[in-house]
Image: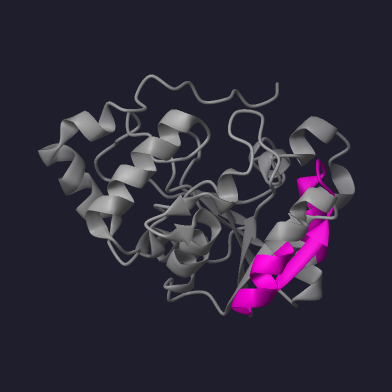
Amino acid sequence: MKVVGIIQARMGSTRLPGKVLRPLAGEPMLARCVSRLQHARTLDQVVVATTTGEEDDAIVDLCRARGWPWFRGECDDVLDRYYRAARQYGAGVVVRVTSDCPLLGPRVVDRVVSALGDADLASNVLPRHTWPRGLDAEAVRMDALERAWHEDTNPATREHVTLYIKRHPERFRLVEVNNHHALPEMRWTVDTPEDYAFASRVYDHFGHDRFSWREVLLLLRSHPEIAEMNRHVMQKALPA
């Protein structure tokens, strides 16, 4: 069964426009995300899923220049974008990650994929965050994604791809992938200028993208002022 990692990416962002192409240690943030996800051992392919919007031509240009597989689809209906991208690339299992997570841990992704087993979805943000925010990963079987694509009629939840599945545990088999030591106070995602400054400090320290998430944790413990840079940023709430 083919396992395809799909990174959703677009230039539009209410709090930090164009963030996916901002540099981190000399490389676009999206390139850092792709590189880190490609190091996951459980994936057969990594695909960038962007939109048909003109502003996202820049993302497609980067994909073409780097030789990355890519797909263009709906802007707000991200579930549709994932479903159609997964079909185009013949996925049996889809691994969902986002382009605002440049500290994504390849071994964390492997743990999520390995936990899927016979379930419909495995997630490390279910039912709550026990990993640093920014290490989010989910693995979903294609047939479950297709059921959600057919059944979810709420545009607000379709924007979050797997939210319909997670909110219907009576209909889908779900697996939680929790961290042994909960670290929900850690914010490693990039959604604001403060988040970007934080990620830049981390990448400037290492100078590459081959570091592990545990090495980031050690860095922040020895330099707590870096973690304080974006600790006050509030995460956007999920739709009701």
For residue 143, above or below residue 69: above
Q: Is residue 8 visible?
A: yes
Q: Camera-side residue: 152 or 99? A: 99
Task: Tell whether 167 sits left or right of 212.
Answer: right
Task: Tell whether 205 sits left or right of 185.
Answer: left
For residue 57, above or below residue 198: below
Q: Identify the residue at horizontal 39%, vertical 52% (top origin).
A: 103
Q: Camera-side residue: 94 or 99? A: 99
- Across and down, in percent, residue 187 comes to 38, 34
- Residue 134 falls in image quadrant: top left
For residue 193, above or below residue 101: above
Residue closest to the far front: 26
- Across and down, in percent, residue 3 comes to 60, 74
User: Over which residues does the magenta segment extend?
Assistant: 60-84
- Across and down, in percent, residue 167 comes to 67, 35
**Image quadrant where one finds the N terminus:** bottom right
Q: Identify the residue at horizontal 42%, vertical 48% (top origin).
A: 135
Q: Identify the residue at horizontal 37%, vertical 44% (top origin).
A: 199
- Residue 217 falls in image quadrant: top left
- Across and down, in percent, residue 177 comes to 42, 50
Residue closest to the far left: 222
Magenta stretch contains residue 115: no
- Residue 166 falls in image quadrant: top right
Magenta stretch contains residue 77: yes
For residue 180, above or below residue 109: above
**Image quadrant where one finds the C terminus:** top right
